[in-house]
Image: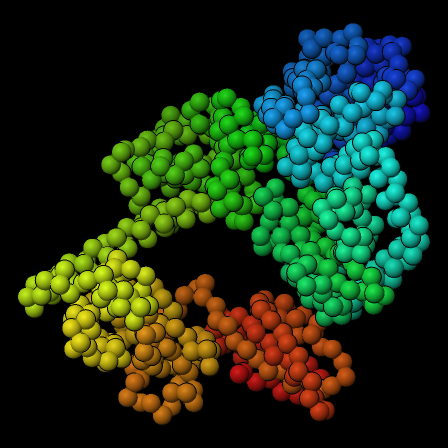
Amino acid sequence: MEKQIEEFIEKCHQIYPEEMVKKIEQAVTFAKESHGEKKRLDGSPYLMHPLAVSEILLDYGVDGETILASILHETINHGNSTEEEIEENFGSEVASIVGTISKLNHLELNDDSLYSAMNLRKILVGMSEDVRVLLLKLADRLHNLRTADALDKETLKKKVTETMNVLIPIAHRLGMYQMKGEMEDLCLKYSKPDVYADILERLSGAEKKLKDSLEEMEESISEMLDEHNIHYRMKSRVKSVYSIYNKLNNGKSWDTIYDILALRVIVEEVSDCYLTIGLIHAKYRPIPGRFKDYIANPKQNMYQSLHTGVFGSDGNRYEIQVRTEEMDEYAEKGVASHFAYKEKHYMKNVMEQKLEIFRNLIESSESLSDVEFQSNIEAELFSESIYVFTPKGDVLELPKGATPIDFAYRIHSDVGDKTVGAIVNDVIVPLSHPLQNDDVVTIKTSANSTPNKEWLNFVVTSHARNKIKAYFSKQEKENYTESGKNILLNELRKKKIPFDTLFTQENVKRICEELKLENLDELYFSIGTLRFTASYIIAFLTEEKKDIQDILLEKVQRKSNDKNTNKGDILVNGYDNILVTLGKCCHPVYGDEIVGFITKGEGITVHKKECKNVSNKKERMIDVSWNMKEDATYAVTLQVIVEPGKNHVADLVSRACEKNISVDAISTKEKENTTIYEMTIKVKDKEELDGFMNSLEMYSFVKEVERI
């Protein structure tokens, strides 16, 4: 024990300041005296357990108070100490954690039912107002499982059931996969020893061969990354026993488990993640359906990584994960990787928001709904956070720069929609006021109030922005629909045609099919937005219709004195709300000279001026122009002709990454004495496209680059 204490203190010296290490040494002495001569079931001094738990937590980089609490966490239940003594010697914060964990350790499952597990999980999270309590509970259980051989069968069974049904789901929601994986393996070892031993034996029998395969693949990928100057580090592993068991138990055969051999590549930048995957796919054949992009689409527990499966040159199947250091830290340690204990008293609500499936568990607070959580996750995943209070004392986590409107929508969409004012720290502030840590925010609402478009200029959360846009989108559509209906009714009155006579069910169905509309409301909307005129609709149904192309030509040739308010990519003689599509034959991009071409049933199609498909059809052409949008991108396909003999996909992808250009697809065609790559990319404008094409032509192996 003395040796373990010495090694433990030495580790603490490497992590914490001298003042905290002295407190830790004091806590060790306090715990040693409190436990006295008490032994664990395996005969070891009782202090060995809290020291082991503390060492587990050291690996997660927790703060000093958590280590103090972990050393002392059994001094109440299995020692002669009280919460008051701990508070007197180590402060209220440490005492609160120890007191809560002491209460939690008295809880256990009533039975094996799912209801009992969910109820216990709810109590655990509800009592754990500080997320550090949950981390300590998980570390405590992990060490207990490591030493569970000393338990009797009945107690062991209860511990395993509780761990599987209660604690492992919590570890999963906290994103603590390293701890979760070890607990799963240990639970399988104790609950199904024969199955565990069989899988372990199969893995062990092929261990040398598997490790050799991993080393070869690791060396091959390293060479590729070195060649492209990508800074990285790499990990490899053989899949855990429980993961294999779970897949076998779900009907998979041993031969169809693709990720027994796994490599993890950790790089510096997000762009390096995509480049690395591109290089790997260029050399090794991907396993269909195995590519997953959890960077652009994170899991609900905020896990991020790129996953793929490939066939190695040795015939083995490999799972490969690519991520940044920050993503890897989170993947291994979950919420523990984001400890910011300068905001200790905020951590209760931070934990609630990480565990969104446990919303409404704590009486005095309200977490985010799943819909709200998902809508905000991408934009706010790792942004710097502030923590603000409701008047009742509940804490909300918001991205830095958030305003009272963001706060209001985080509480509830109805609150956001009806907001008329805000009071921050007892002072009335503008709705655009940036909130700060510790602010107490009161939102004033009115039943008759509605959102203001000006809010879009200062809100920062994607949820608030989406809700505001959705409101006005719905309102605009309703207004256009009502306007279109009135225009049509007025035209019918002029022509003295009863509505019911002309707009029979059969006629409505016929015109909707012809014009590719969903229903009568969409027809009204099309009239209200001037896509079709009321006269044309009536003429169509009375068999006096003009050709739809003629109607469109008449429409765009009318002069408009209104100021242009077009929000699309293309202006049609300054006219708004006309259906416009970009020609798929020539793929125009911003900066190209373009013309519009009237297309039956599809409005106006925009082509490059020299496009062969419209060059001989002057009568259907109209003037169009670009309406630049900062966030607009355009798909273009390039034909890159190269010298044969070597695969250059990685070079092309690398150059695209250098130029910050998105690559949607690459295909290869082999012809006599030449290789052709068809490369679909997205660019902002013709200038960016020309620059990229010129950069490709600088490669010595490239013969020609054409836009097709």
Q: Is residue 554 visible?
A: no
Q: Is residue 610 above or below residue 667?
A: below
Q: Is residue 478 above or below residue 29?
A: below
Q: Nearer the viewer, residue 448 or 187?
A: 187
Identified at 52% across, 45% down, the residue is 374
Identified at 52% across, 35% down, the residue is 397
Identified at 13% across, 61% down, the residue is 499
Quadrant where the image shows the N terminus: top right
Q: Position of residue 316 (x, y in %)?
A: 82, 61
Q: Is residue 513 above or below residue 546?
A: above
Location of residue 277 (image quadrant):
bottom right
Q: Is residue 324 visible?
A: yes
Q: Nearer the viewer, residue 106 or 621?
A: 106
Q: Position of residue 140 (x, y in %)?
A: 76, 25
Identified at 83% across, 22% down, the residue is 153
Q: Is residue 299 above or below residue 131?
A: below
Q: Position of residue 3 (x, y in %)?
A: 93, 25
Residue found at the far front of this picture:
506
In the displayed structure image, the side of residue 641 where residue 384 appears, left or right = left
In the displayed structure image, the side of residue 336 where residue 235 appears, left or right = right
The number of callouts visible is 0
Instruction: Tell me which colouring the rendered structure shows.
Output: rainbow
In the displayed structure image, the side of residue 200 where residue 692 appears, left or right = left
Location of residue 694 (image quadrant):
bottom right
Q: Position of residue 281 (x, y in %)?
A: 71, 67
Q: Nearer the viewer, residue 445 or 363?
A: 363
